[in-house]
Image (cartoon, rainbow, N blue to C red):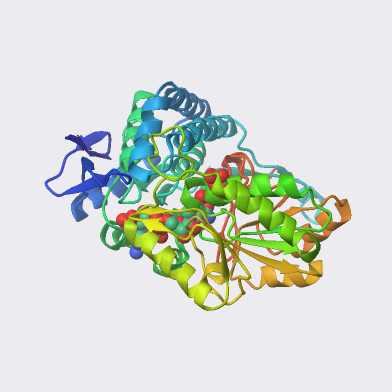
Amino acid sequence: MEHYPILIDGRWISTEEKLEVKEKYSGKTIATVSIASEVLVEQAVAAAQTAYRTNALPPYRRYEILKRTSELVLANKQQLGRLIAQEVGKTLKEAVVEVERTAQTLEISAEEAKRIHGEGIPVESSPGAENRLAFTIRVPVGVVCAITPFNVPLNLVAHKVGPALAAGNAVVLKPASVTPLIAVKLAQLFEQAGLPPGYLNLVIGSGSSVGEQLAQDERINLYTFTGSPAVGKQLKQRTGLRKVLLELGSNSAVIVHKDADVELAAGLTVGKSFGNAGQVCISVQRIYVHQDIKERFVKAFVQRTLALRTGDPFDPATDVGPMISEKEAVRAEQWVHEALEAGATLECGGKRDGALFQPTVLSHVKEEMKVTCEELFAPVVGISEYTELDECIERINLSRYGLQAGIFTANLSTAFHAARRIHVGGLIVNDASQFRADLMPYGGVKESGWGKEGPKYAIEEMTEERIVVFNL
Ligand SMILES: NC(=O)C1=CN([C@@H]2O[C@H](COP(=O)(O)OP(=O)(O)OC[C@H]3O[C@@H](n4cnc5c(N)ncnc54)[C@H](OP(=O)(O)O)[C@@H]3O)[C@@H](O)[C@H]2O)C=CC1
Ligand SMILES: O=C(O)[C@H](O)COP(=O)(O)O
């Protein structure tokens, strides 16, 4: 069985303590991976600090390395896609798209490495400062710690490591314990692309040991975290005054207004409700349909949902693979049962077989049900109706979360009204909440987090602005 080592200061290290990684569909162990001891985690941070302090890479070199890594990712598309499909359980089709998007994220990061700049500041216009000249420069923060989740284990790593390196930082990466293999592969490609030792260090181990140790290491200047709100909050508490970027959960909403194209709305929303078995932070969870079109919409939505096939991620006919674990599928099933007991209607789905959970549509859901107010992270959607748009927006804004939302409407003023009123990081008009182009600013408000991703915006977060004033 293949063994995956960890990477510290350019050395690939195999440790005594190992973690078994399972294929999520079959449950078979597919590889083992080395767990980093406390001493090795300490060395990883030291290596990043030394690399950053002693061996500054010029922007053009960062561009070359990131661009080359992007090319290598594409050249290995099928192999990387297969590994993602195995360790996450998402379909091979979805996994290959993730690899293609990773190449994009790295390429955009490469380009942005050449565009980091400050601005001239007209201090001479202040009385008494007539003979001064000033400008700002952006400098790397230093050591960046990236902690990533299981659901998008390659592209979300690229969204952290790409901008961090582009900005001139050194990185310590800790991927999710259930999906660590693809991160090892990416680190190998960075090495192949010429990244010098110490710039990317990869440590694997549980959040409660390796994650906690990293959170308390004062040599780390910035944390970039994607994961659950509970862990995000804990990380923020542990890290004091140091900078923390948080991409957390959500229960994304979509409005289908009375003037919407119902078929278009149903078609696009189904695709974005059940992808990766609903385990996407901007996956559609709540659909608010205007009462005038509710019946038509539910019919069209359910019809399309029933056409989806659940099963083996490697079967080209499969649309929805297993969830990350049976435990998570059981949780989703319980939440669905609770909703049904509290008065929701099961339109389709609701059945579970191990970690496989059938795409499920509920109607007549209420705001206080877990399937509505908590983050579901499962292939389950709840539909409710509204009469007045403002009342619907108020209901959406009741959520603790605010990552992205969608609205289907034929009216520009309605779309603008929603864009101003819905409290989220992004509003998608005439598409569902789950739209992300890798270059756009991406991130939430409220308990969905703090700070933006998208290479240009992440680089701003991962650099410090410094003013330089000349007395001429
Ligand atoms: N806003 C966004 O862009 C996205 C948000 N998410 C959110 O991520 C969640 C699902 O991912 P999941 O992996 O289950 O999330 P978790 O929060 O459980 O884990 C995320 C990462 O944090 C680590 N971790 C766990 N505990 C600690 C700790 N005490 N200190 C430091 N690190 C720790 C985990 O390690 P280990 O695996 O070892 O436990 C893992 O690497 C959902 O809530 C989802 O919405 C997902 C994708 C995108
Ligand atoms: O954070 C996530 O879950 C994803 O980045 C957002 O969704 P997508 O990458 O699948 O578009």
Compared across the picture, whether 419 is left or right of 115 comes to right
Question: Where 435 falls versus 424 (above or below)?
Answer: above
Residue 403 location, x and y as percent?
61, 58
Q: Quadrant of the C terminus?
A: top right
Q: Residue furthest left?
A: 16
| Residue visible at 84% across and 54% down in the picture | 259
Left or right for 294, reference 274 = right
* Numbered-mark total: 0
Q: Is residue 75 above or below residue 199?
A: above
- Up/down of 229 relative to 267, above or below: below
Front position in the image: 96 or 170: 96
Q: Nearer the viewer, residue 320 or 238?
A: 320
- What quarter of the picture does the N terminus occupy? top left
Q: Quadrant of residue 213?
A: bottom left
Residue 320 x %, y %:
46, 45
Q: Position of residue 3 (x, y in %)?
A: 19, 36
Q: Quadrant of ligand 1?
A: bottom left
Quadrant assignment, res 384: bottom right
Q: Residue at position x 19%, y 52% from top?
A: 37
State whether residue 179 appears in this view.
Answer: yes
**Residue 231: x percent and y percent?**
41, 64
Choose between 94 and 438: the one closer to the eye: 94
Whether residue 432 is visible here, answered yes or no, is no
Tell me what residue is drawn at x 32 percent, y 30 percent. 188
